[in-house]
Every structure is written in structure tokens, then in C-alpha cells.
Amino acid sequence: MKGKKEMSDMTESEISYRKFLKNLGVTTHKELENLIKKKIENGELSHESTINITAKIKIDELDFNHSINATLLLPKNND
């Protein structure tokens, strides 16, 4: 596959970035799933509705602030 680097070809810094981003994605996904499930169960949210989300990453040492906005579709009743 052109453009895709193997882990063995990456620098230590590239690997650390990837590990951070993977950890961010996996942990955030789990937290979102659990919270959304609870909110649906207690009636605060409903199946197949949408919610707006803003994700922010801040790195003080780099004076870096990055935001991503999206709309999430909540799971169907049988998901």
C-alpha cells in the first residue's frame, strides 16, 4: 500500500504520536458510548437523534489549539 508506513519504518516520535492518537480515539469512543447509553436509558437523549460535538486538543508547550466539530448520529434502538 503506497503511503502507509509500517511501524518498523517509523521514527520514535511518529510512533509516540500514533500511540497518543490511538489512545485518545479508543478512550474517547468508550466514554462516549457509555455516556450516550446512560443518557438514552434515562430519557435525556433518544435513539437515532443527533448531537453536536466539539473536540478540542490543547498543547501548551506548542501554543497549539485544535478543534474539530461534528454531528453524531445516536444509535438505533437495536444497536
Image: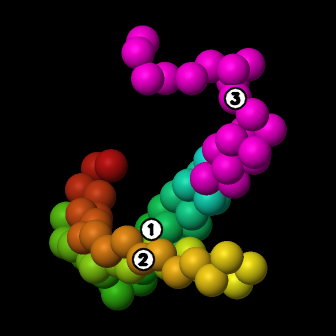
| Disc 3 crowd, CA 10 A, few/some/many (<14, 14-19, 20+) | few
Instruction: Answer whether residue 3 is magenta in the image.
Output: yes
| Residue at the (24%, 63%) spot, across then down | 73
Q: Nearer the viewer, mark 3 or mark 1?
A: 3
Residue 65 coordinates in the image, percent (x, y): 53, 81
| Residue at the (48%, 62%) spot, across then down | 33
Which residue corresponds to mark 3? 10
Q: Residue furthest left?
A: 49
Magenta stretch: dominant secondary structure: helix
**Relative to 8, is 63 on the left or the right?**
left
| Residue at the (67%, 50%) spot, across then down | 17
CA gap between label 3 and label 1 equals: 38 Å
Residue 5 coordinates in the image, percent (x, y): 57, 23
Which residue corresponds to mark 2? 67
Q: Secondary structure at mark 2?
A: strand
Q: Residue furthest top?
A: 1
Asked if residue 40 can be seen in this view, the reply is no
Residue type indicated by callout 2: Ser
For marks 3 and 1, the one nearer the N-term is 3
**Relative to 58, is 76 on the left or the right?**
left
Residue type indicated by callout 3: Met
- 75 w.r.t. 62: above or below: above
Specify the quadrant of the image occupied by residue 52.
bottom left
Specify the quadrant of the image occupied by residue 9.
top right
Residue type indicated by callout 1: Lys
Q: Secondary structure at mark 3?
A: loop
Which residue corresponds to mark 1? 37
Q: Which residues are magenta?
A: 1-21
Given residues 63 and 66, the one toward you in this image is 63
